[in-house]
């Protein structure tokens, strides 16, 4: 029996293979329990910072990636105890198989570690979302989404550098020095993208608009659905989906329609010059009565001008920040009320009756019918 366990296969004893396989299988069987316990320990630390942390949500997010990381870590560490077979000691394009296997294992380990950290970021973002919802501030939610994506990008860059250092043996210091020079050239080439990135920070901290606001920019009107690192996504009033670079959202004149405090309505009437002043005054009083309603917060009705062809009566009124359909309903009712007031007072709009003179070119006689 001892001879069987000490028999060499690919420069390693069968007993060593069984030990390595046993360790990996044992880790595979208990990884979920170990990951759950590890997540509980991390939770105790996190709870000191955030008092209202939900343990179940935390463990659901962290347990699976933590278990995968532990399994990969143990597998790589135990396999490293095996001697590399001399029969496999060959090169492929000046790279040995041993180096390839070592690099492959390192890459998997780094990816599992970065995945675990991204899950932690997701959990922190979830906590901040809950806090923002309690504060009823949608701009905070928007900021959380932005920085969650931003830190994930940073983690991806760190993971790439770790792979280059640990798996391929690159000197990160020299690499960063070289990248700084290349980065300067790339920054010049990608100047517009960097400007959009900076503009995204301006949007999040200056808060000219937030997700869910209705804005008008570059002749487009729509609802902001997402603010990203480079651009802002807007659902237009035509139900199309447009992407606007953040630089344009900052540099252009932007009208945030959701921040309006009132909606303005106006009506300009040109009254015929044959209307008596008494009827004009009667109509103005009637129009003021029409605007004296709950939806209208303030209004003005006045004889604003007298021209050679008409009396100009100007109506202006302001409703509260109601929806567009409610505003249109109020506007229609006021317009119908104005028409009824014109009919009751016997006032006609200028141009409703026109005097036309037909002249006889021969006799010089003329007829003046009234239409």
Image (cartoon, helix red, strand yellow):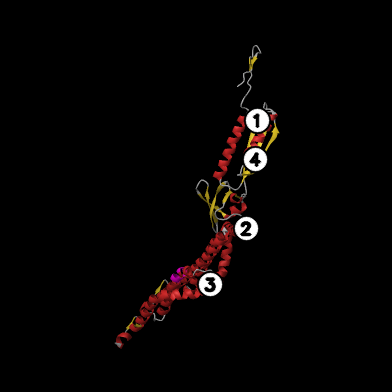
1 or 2: mark nearer the eye: 1
Provide the major secondary structure of the magenta segment: helix
Where disc 3 sits, the SS reads helix
Element carrying mark 1: strand
N-term-proximal mark, 1 vs 4:
1
Q: Is 158 or 63 nearer to us in this picture? A: 63
Q: Label 4 vs label 3: CA separation? A: 58 Å
Q: Which of these two is toward me, 72 or 162?
A: 72
Q: Which residue is mark 2?
A: 206
The span from disc 4 to disc 2 (Cα, nearest Å) is: 34 Å
Estimate how packed mark 4 is, as few (under 14), some (14 to 19) or many (20 or more) residues with alpha carbons within 10 Å. some
Magenta residues, start to end: 60-65
Q: Pointer 1 and pointer 3: residues touching (CB < 8 Å)? A: no
Q: Separation of disc 3 and disc 2 at Cα?
A: 31 Å
Q: Which mark is residue 316?
A: 4
Quadrant the C terminus occupies: top right
Q: Is residue 91 above or below residue 369?
A: below
Label 2 packing within 10 angstroms: few (<14), some (14-19), many (20+): few
How far apart are the two marked residues, 1 and 4, measured between alpha carbons?
17 Å
Relative depth, front residue between 64 and 269? 269
Secondary structure type for disc 4: strand
Q: Identify the residue position indicated by label 1 in the image.
A: 271
Q: Are marks 1 and 2 in contact (CB under 8 Å)?
A: no
Point out the frontmost of discs 4 and 2: 4
């Amino acid at each position: 029996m001892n001879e069987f366990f000490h028999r060499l296969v690919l420069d390693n004893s069968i007993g060593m293979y069984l030990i390595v396989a046993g360790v990996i299988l044992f880790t595979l069987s208990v990884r979920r329990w170990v990951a759950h316990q590890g997540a509980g320990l991390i939770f105790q630390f996190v709870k000191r910072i955030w008092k209202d942390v939900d343990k179940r949500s935390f463990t659901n997010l962290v347990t699976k990636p933590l278990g995968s990381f532990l399994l990969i870590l143990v597998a790589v560490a135990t396999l490293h105890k095996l001697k590399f077979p001399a029969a496999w000691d060959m090169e492929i394009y000046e790279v040995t198989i041993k180096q390839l296997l070592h690099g492959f294992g390192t890459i998997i380990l780094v990816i599992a570690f970065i995945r675990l950290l991204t899950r932690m970021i997701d959990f922190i973002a979830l906590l901040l979302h809950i806090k923002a919802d309690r504060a009823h501030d949608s701009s905070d939610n928007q900021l959380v989404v932005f920085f969650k994506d931003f830190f994930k990008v940073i983690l991806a860059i760190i993971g790439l550098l770790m792979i280059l250092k640990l798996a391929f043996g690159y000197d990160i210091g020299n690499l960063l020095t070289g990248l700084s020079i290349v980065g300067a050239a790339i920054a010049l080439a990608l100047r517009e993208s960097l400007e959009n990135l900076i503009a995204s920070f301006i949007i999040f901290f200056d808060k000219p608009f937030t997700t869910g606001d209705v804005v008008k920019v570059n002749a487009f009107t729509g609802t902001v659905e997402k603010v990203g690192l480079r651009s802002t996504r807007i659902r237009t009033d035509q139900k199309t989906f447009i992407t606007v670079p953040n630089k344009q959202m900052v540099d252009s004149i932007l009208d945030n329609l959701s921040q309006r405090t009132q909606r303005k309505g106006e009506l300009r009437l040109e009254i015929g010059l044959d209307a008596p002043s008494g009827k004009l005054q009667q109509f103005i009083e009637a129009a003021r009565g029409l605007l004296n309603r709950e939806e209208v917060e303030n209004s003005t009705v006045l004889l604003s001008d007298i021209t050679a062809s008409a009396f100009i009566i100007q109506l202006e009124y302001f409703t509260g920040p109601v929806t567009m359909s409610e505003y249109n309903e109020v506007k229609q009712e006021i317009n119908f009320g104005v028409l009824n007031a014109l009919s009751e007072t016997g006032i006609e709009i200028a141009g409703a009756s026109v005097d036309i003179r037909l002249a006889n070119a021969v006799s010089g006689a003329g007829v003046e019918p009234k239409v």
